[in-house]
Amino acid sequence: MEGGDRDCIVACAGGELAGFARWEGNGIAQVFVLPAWHGRGAATLLLTSAEEELNRAGHKRIWLQCQVGNLRARRFYEKHGWSVAREHDTDIGTVEGRKPQRVWRMEKLLG
């Protein structure tokens, strides 16, 4: 893991980018891992690192959004102590611009 600025962390292995996580306020805005690194622990390290940074910043209830229907991601977050608080519509930035999406708002209490 290599640190980025204070609201982003990047995972690299063997000089290659594996993924990144970034956060805003008390929420995790994005966790992204390149497909070649799926199932190899990068997502867990990124998620845990983002949670630790939010905890250090004094946030006790944190949140993230997961696209409705992305059961793989939802199971991953639930495995790490997150739970669905509600489902709602929002705009999410994509490589094609902002698009309306139905998301699960997931929350976690930090200790």
Image: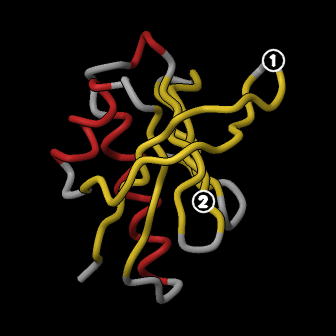
The x and y percentages for residue 64 are 47, 54
Q: Determine the residue located farthest toward the bottom in the rendered image.
A: 58
Q: Is mark 1 on a helix, strand or loop?
A: loop
Q: Give amino acid for label 2.
A: Trp
Q: Which residue is drawn at 69% across and 38% down?
A: 92
Q: Residue at x 24, y 56 (%)?
A: 83
The x and y percentages for residue 96 are 81, 17
The x and y percentages for residue 9 are 58, 51
Image position of 106 with respect to 56: above or below: above
Instruction: Tell me, yes or no, whether the two marked residues, 2 and 1, touch with CB atoms within 8 Å.
Output: no
Q: Quadrant of residue 69?
A: top left
Lateral position of residue 53 relative to residue 98, left or right: left
Q: Residue at x 40, y 65 (%)?
A: 51
Q: Which of marks 2 and 1 is in front?
A: 1
Mark 2 neighbour density, 10 Å: few (under 14) some (14–19) many (20 or more): many
**Distance (Cα) linking label 2 and label 1:** 21 Å
The x and y percentages for residue 58 are 47, 89
Image position of 73 with respect to 84: above or below: above
Mark 1 neighbour density, 10 Å: few (under 14) some (14–19) many (20 or more): few
Q: Residue at x 45, y 63 (%)?
A: 63
Q: Name the residue under label 1.
A: 96
Q: Determine the residue located farthest toward the front in the rendered image.
A: 88
The one of 6 and 55 positioned closer to us in this rendering: 55
Could you say which disc has been placed on residue 23 in the image? 2
